[in-house]
Image: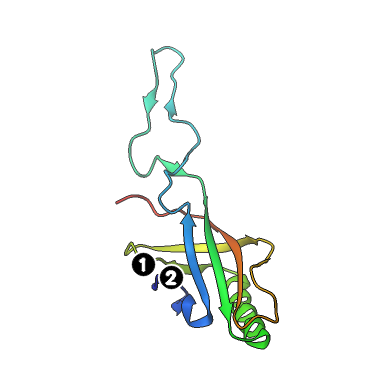
């Protein structure tokens, strides 16, 4: 179990949510728009090469999670808290343990809950993913 995954400063593991994998944070950013300006009377293009000229598209960040609880009531309390935390309108701050950067993200969608154990088991374990969009992606420094 890796600690340090936080949304708006709330450690997810406190609420039984463990992040098993993150996709998208280390992906290359996709450039937006033209690479430069092409003058009709000159060869090639005049490349955009300053930070002010270069823009990037939003990117998706996918958290693959599992949630564990000792009882069905604890499970629903934890799941509902997590849903309220991430699904509020506006931007959330996502922190991950392996970088000092923070990511300003908005909730996009969540998956179906996969029940790994039944509700009569001693420990309830379910998996799901949550997709966020980073509207203004963090640029490499």
Residue lying furthest left: 141
Residue name at image x 43 percent, y 19 percent: 39
Can residue 87 be seen in the rendering of this structure?
A: yes
Q: Position of residue 113 (x, y in %)?
A: 67, 66
Disc number at residue 97?
1
Q: Residues within 10 Å of mark 2 (few under 14, many from 20)?
A: some
Of residue 79 and residue 136, the one placed in the foreground of this image is 79
Q: Is residue 65 left or right of residue 102?
A: right
Where is residue 48 drawn, in percent x and y?
A: 37, 33
Q: How many marks?
A: 2
From where the camera sits, is residue 85 visible? Answer: no
- Is the residue under label 1 in contact with that under label 2 (CB below 8 Å)? yes
In the image, residue 138 lies at what x, y percent?
40, 55
Image quadrant where one finds the N terminus? bottom left
Is 12 placed left or right of 79 in the picture?
Answer: left
State the colouring used for the structure image. rainbow
Residue toward you, 94 or 136: 94
Query: Is tag 2's residue or tag 1's residue first in the polypeptide sequence?
Result: 2
SS state under label 2: loop
Residue at 38%, 12% (x, y): give it. Answer: 43
Depicted 76 relative to depicted 95: above or below: below
Q: Which mark is residue 5?
A: 2
The residue sitting at 46% across, 67% down in the picture is: 94
Residue drawn at (53%, 79%), measured in percent from left and top? 16
- Residue 76: % across, % down: 67, 82
Q: Dot 1, crowdedness within 10 Å: few (<14), some or many (≥20)? A: few
* Mark identifier at residue 67: none
Q: Is residue 109 left or right of residue 105?
A: right
What is the spatial separation of the Cα atoms under label 2 and label 1, in whole angstroms? 6 Å
């Amino acid at each position: 179990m890796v600690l340090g995954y936080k949304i708006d400063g709330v450690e997810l593991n406190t609420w039984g949510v463990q992040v098993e994998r993150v996709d998208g944070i280390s992906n290359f950013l996709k450039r937006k728009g033209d690479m430069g300006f092409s003058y009709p009377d000159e060869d090639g293009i005049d490349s955009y090469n300053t930070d002010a000229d270069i823009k990037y598209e939003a990117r998706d960040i996918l958290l693959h999670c599992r949630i564990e609880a000792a009882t069905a009531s604890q499970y629903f309390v934890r799941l509902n808290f997590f849903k309220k935390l991430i699904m509020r309108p506006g931007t959330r701050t996502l922190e991950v343990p392996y970088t000092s950067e923070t990511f300003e993200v908005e909730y996009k969608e969540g998956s179906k809950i996969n029940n790994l154990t039944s509700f009569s088991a001693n420990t309830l374990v379910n998996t799901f993913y949550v997709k966020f969009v980073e509207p203004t992606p963090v640029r490499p420094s």
